Image (cartoon, rainbow, N blue to C red):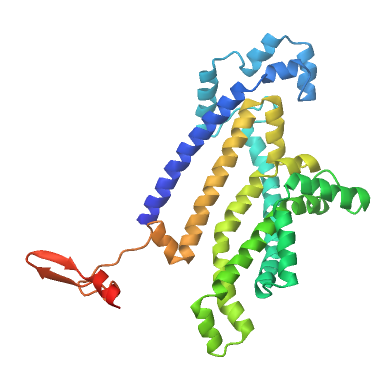
Amino acid sequence: MKIVMFVGRRLIRLVLCLFAVSLLTFGLLQLAPGDFAGIQEAGGGNVSLAQQATSETRSELSDRYGAEVPIWQQYTTFMAGALTGDMGPSYRYPHRTVEGIIASAFPISAALAVTATLVAVGVALPIGILAAVRRRTILDSGTMFVATVGNGLPNYLAGLVLVLIFGVALGLLPLYGWKGPEHMVLPTLALAIAPIGVLARYVRSSMLENLRQEYVVTARAKGGRESAVLVGHVLRNSLMPLVTVVGPMFASLATGTIFVEQIFGIPGLGHYFTQAAVSRDMPLLMGTTLFFAALLMVMNLLVDLSYAAVDPRVRTDLGLAAEGPRRKDDVGDGIAHEEDGGHVRSEGAATRGAV
């Protein structure tokens, strides 16, 4: 029952956050200079619409795309349609609906995000483990220096560097398009470099923290092999907190492919978001922004639930721990109650202090 209430509260919060995001996005779009009709009249954006604009007046374009409709009516019309899953046609791509664009483009962005996450985890784990085991050595210092540099490298800059090295200088990989697995290599690496740095440092820190725990000292004192202690005790407990990092990291990668998709010409959701922003395509911009926001919040909810499933302490923090029947002589609680003049006095604190 508690889990249902917890999920219900989070879903209510999600709806309220999406409402706030929609208001903020729509407000910023209205404050931005220019509108879709004006941009098309000037010859910007979609080529077919730009040609169309040469033979149509601005008023006709404004009527067609609702620029003259009151602002509040534009917002309520879009949100009413969004609640039913019908966000209407895109201004820039008039023969495609917003939900259709999201449905076709998001799998591409998700494929990039999944691949980049797998690469990041696969590379960062051994780096972080080796750095922790070889603490305060050249290996530790070198790997952490590289991880720190990678962590501070924006994915668009990483993409440009990879293009210059592997595409232009060496000519080993294609630079543009989305036609086969070879087109995924460079954008995946561009997205994975920063997460590798984050995860490597996180794994190292978690490993070092667990290496100092008493259960590790006890396992070593019992004559356990170092490899068995590391794998059976330290590594298992060190990797458990990764759930809280990998989940949001995937969501961040899925919503952070905007620049990478532009650099490599990938028709993912980030590409359409950029095109919508440039051309002031209100339905498409609102739809992609709300989708990105919902994805982030849903992923955070799933991470909390999955982490609570494997760690009882998190269940307690989130209020999901099951409360069993309390007994008067409950030894685990360590609290004794005795009647004194009609009052009940707790001696738990005094008992623990004496111990």
**Drawn side of residue 217 relative to residue 119, left or right:** left
Residue 246 location (% of width, % of height): 60, 57
Residue 330 location (% of width, % of height): 25, 74
Residue 93 location (% of width, % of height): 71, 28
Q: Residue at x 66, y 19 (%)?
A: 35
Q: Residue at x 53, y 82 (%)?
A: 217
Judge by depth and name the residue closer to the eye, 81 or 253.
Answer: 253
Q: Residue furthest left?
A: 341
Judge by depth and name the residue closer to the eye, 333 or 291.
Answer: 333
Residue 100 location (% of width, % of height): 64, 36
Query: Does residue 14 lie above or below 153 as drawn?
Result: above
Tell me the quadrant of the picture where the C terminus can be found.
bottom left
Q: Residue at x 64, y 31 (%)?
A: 284
Q: Looking at the rendering, which quadrant does residue 122 occupy?
A: bottom right
Query: Does residue 114 lie above or below 175 as drawn?
Result: below
Query: Does residue 75 lie above or below 137 as drawn?
Result: above
Marks counted in the figure total: 0
Query: Does residue 65 lie above or below 169 as drawn?
Result: above
Tell me the quadrant of the picture where the N terminus can be found.
bottom left
**Drawn side of residue 354 relative to residue 306, left or right:** left
Q: Looking at the rendering, which quadrant does residue 101 occupy?
A: top right
Q: Residue at x 60, y 66 (%)?
A: 205
Judge by depth and name the residue closer to the eye, 140 or 54.
Answer: 140
Q: Residue furthest bottom?
A: 223
Q: Looking at the rendering, which quadrant does residue 43 occupy?
A: top right
